[in-house]
Image (tube, rainbow, N blue to C red):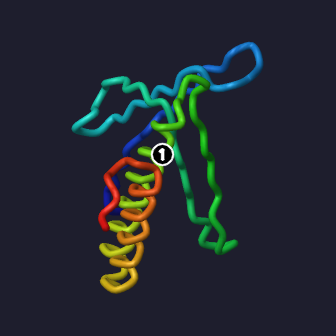
Amino acid sequence: MASSKSSKITITVELDEDQKPENIIWQADAPPQEGKSQQAKAMFLSLFDGEAKDTMKLDLWTKDFQLAEMDRFVFHSLRAMADAYLKGTNNKELANDMQKFAHYFAEETEIIPKQD
């Protein structure tokens, strides 16, 4: 029998008295984060269920997460999704369209200046 490796990622969400996220702490047992606890202010977690052909998602952000931070978080997430889509499908045209939307989003939220 072939040996297999595994890696573990742990996410801890500390809640306030109203059950709202106060802190999000994650830790991985693989490099480069191996053994280090990292704080985060927000997270998007999407898992694809191959049997149901649907996505399960968990979106959380801490109560002190500012609107400007959410805009920047969504912008970076959109760019990362476009990059992952390109890597997974090699569909350059659609990935480019996704990047264009991310750019538009960044302009509209004033993360980057609008280009005339």
Residue 55, position as x, y percentages in the image: 63, 64
Taking the spot 62% from the left edge, 53% from the top edge, the residue there is 57
Taking the spot 41% from the left edge, 72% from the top edge, the residue there is 98
Taking the spot 42% from the left edge, 40% from the top edge, the residue there is 8
Q: Which of 104 and 47 lies nearest the eye of the viewer?
A: 104
User: In which quadrant is the N terminus drawn?
Assistant: bottom left
Furthest residue in direction top, as rendered: 17
Furthest residue in direction front, as rendered: 116
Graded by Cα atoms within 10 Å as few (under 14), some (14 to 19) or many (20 or more), the crowding at tag 1 reads some
Taking the spot 60% from the left edge, 38% from the top edge, the residue there is 60
Residue 32 shown left or right of residue 47 in the figure = left
Q: Which of 54 and 115 lies nearest the eye of the viewer?
A: 115
Residue 76, position as x, y percentages in the image: 38, 52
Q: Which of 19 and 51 lies nearest the eye of the viewer?
A: 19
Q: Secondary structure at mark 1?
A: helix
Residue 92, position as x, y percentages in the image: 30, 83
Residue 78 image-quadrant placement: bottom left
Q: Is residue 67 above or below residue 98?
A: above
Q: Amino acid at mark 1?
A: Asp
- Residue at the disc numbered 1: 71
Q: Is residue 49 above or below residue 66?
A: below
